[in-house]
Image: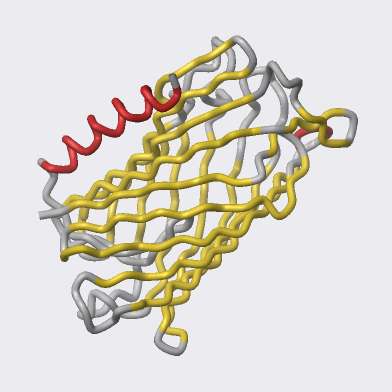
Amino acid sequence: MTLKFLSIANLIILICLVFTPTILFCSPIFGSATSLLAKGEFMIENHVYYFPYDQYWWNEKWVDFPQDSGYTSGKILSEIYWGAAREVTLKLTLPLIYAKLGDEENKGIGDAIFSILYQPLRTEDEESVGVVLWAGARLPTGDYDHFPPLGDGSYDVVFSIYSMSDFYGAINYSTVGLWLNTDDYEGNSIGEQYFYNFALQIPILRNKKPFANIMGELDGYFIDGVDFKKENFHQACLGIQYVNTKNLVIEAAVSATIYKVIGYRNIYTPVFGILFSF
């Protein structure tokens, strides 16, 4: 059921990609790059995630799911970019989620995020080293009336700083940010979330077409909440980006959980992404 849902949803998104004019750029698979679009241009980026959770947090420790039960989730994360001005890009993040916990399942749109990306010191060189400021708002568009919920019912705002720099021929991406959360649909105080992403993009087959990048990332967050909402999560990611032409990038990666407290835990998360432009 999960694979069928993801296949149909991914097909719809790929059809949208074919009819969307865009400028293509490579970026971290889990994090974000500093590249902005030129004024009036569009891009759609999509990633497919699969989460095979095998444990849940209970009484201050991790407990295995019963053999006849478990929690499985799949997500297609679609990000739509529009170059509103030379220094400003608008972005809509829309997740499509499937979740199954025991005998109960739910699917549909998750919580949407509207963002503004601003590069204050952009130069004429579109590939130049730069810093991007990100401000966004997350809306409770995900269904939380049915179980498992597809969103937490809160209105949130986020602030972040992206940076990109050259590192001995590779590209280093760094992201730090802050989520300001309101209470969830059960009235629980979620607390502030501090997050980060550090990525190193190493080009291979540099002078050939097609070419590829090896991507290594450290990614995580900490929620400074109360009681069971004090969550801590860190993961390491390794992936490859295959650039077939100037308008086609295919990405594949896997992440491994280093440390997590609260919620559900999976040992690994496979990821597939595709970017298409013309």
Quarter of the image for residue 29 reads bottom left
- In percent of width and height, residue 124 lies at 20, 79
**Residue situated furthest right in the rendering:** 59
- In percent of width and height, residue 81 lies at 26, 49
The residue at the point 29 percent across, 49 percent down is: 274
Report the front residue among 250 and 180. 250
Report the front residue among 203 and 182. 203
The residue at the point 43 percent across, 69 percent down is: 214
Applied colour scheme: secondary structure
| Left/right of residue 101 with respect to residue 46 in the rendered view | right
Vertical placement of 42 versus 23: above or below? above
- In percent of width and height, residue 103 lies at 61, 10
**Residue situated furthest bottom in the rendering:** 168
| Left/right of residue 258 with respect to residue 31 in the rendered view | right
| Left/right of residue 185 with respect to residue 274 in the rendered view | right
Vertical placement of 148 versus 135: above or below? above
- In percent of width and height, residue 162 lies at 46, 65
Report the front residue among 168 and 131. 168
Locate the N terminus and report the quarter of the image it occupies.
Answer: top left
Vertical placement of 46 versus 71: above or below? below
State the count of labels.
Answer: 0
The residue at the point 40 percent across, 29 percent down is: 96
Report the front residue among 246 and 90. 246
Vertical placement of 205 versus 233: above or below? below
| Left/right of residue 136 with respect to residue 83 in the rendered view | right
Locate the C terminus and report the quarter of the image it occupies.
Answer: bottom left
